[in-house]
């Protein structure tokens, strides 16, 4: 998938969880990514983060620490 589409999708997830009550929004974003994104999508997100994470919402960047990135 294009990097722009991946960023848009990740940001949409963050936007949803930002509106939810509680203080665990980053964990919930990470849970969603781990549960619903294919390993290759999480790998692509990891590469994007390593390159600086341009365009990603701060909540996605915070959540990334809890994302399970598959070994390549």
Image (spheres, grey):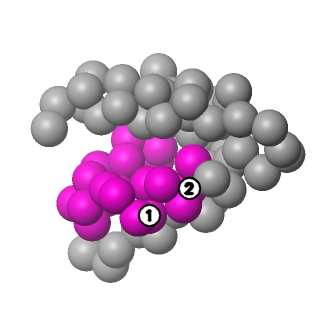
Q: Which circle marks residue 34 in the picture?
A: 1
Q: Position of residue 53 (x, y in %)?
A: 48, 34
Residue 55 as seen in the image, left or right of residue 39: right
- Residue drawn where x is 85% and y is 45% of the image: 23
Quadrant for the C terminus, please.
Answer: bottom left
Q: Is residue 42 above or below residue 51?
A: below
Q: Is residue 44 above or below residue 7?
A: below
Q: Is residue 19 above or below residue 29?
A: above
Secondary structure under badge 2?
helix
Q: Which residue is mark 2?
A: 30
Mark 2 closeness class: few <14, some 14–19, many ≥20 residues within 10 Å: many
User: Is any atom of residue 2 visible in this view?
Assistant: yes
Magenta stretch, main secondary structure, is helix
Is residue 21 or residue 34 the one in the foreground? 21
Residue found at the far bottom of this picture: 71
Q: Which residues are magenta?
A: 29-51
- Residue drawn where x is 54% and y is 60% of the image: 31
Mark 1 closeness class: few <14, some 14–19, many ≥20 residues within 10 Å: some
Quadrant for the N terminus, please.
Answer: top left
Mark 1 in CB contact with mark 2 (< 8 angstroms): yes
- Residue drawn where x is 57% and y is 25% of the image: 15
Is residue 11 or residue 65 the one in the foreground? 11
- Residue drawn where x is 34% and y is 58% of the image: 36
Mark 1 to mark 2: distance in Å? 6 Å
Q: Position of residue 44 (x, y in %)?
A: 29, 50
Q: Quadrant of residue 10?
A: top left
Residue 6 as seen in the image, left or right of residue 12: left
Q: Position of residue 61 (x, y in %)?
A: 60, 41
User: Is any atom of residue 51 visible in this view?
Assistant: no
């Amino acid at each position: 998938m294009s990097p722009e589409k991946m960023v848009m999708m990740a940001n949409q997830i963050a936007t949803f969880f930002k509106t939810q009550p509680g203080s665990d929004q980053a964990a919930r974003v990470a849970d969603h990514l781990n549960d619903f994104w294919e390993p290759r999508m999480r790998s692509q997100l990891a590469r994007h983060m390593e390159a600086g994470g341009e365009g990603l919402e701060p909540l996605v960047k915070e959540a990334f620490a809890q994302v399970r990135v598959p070994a390549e």
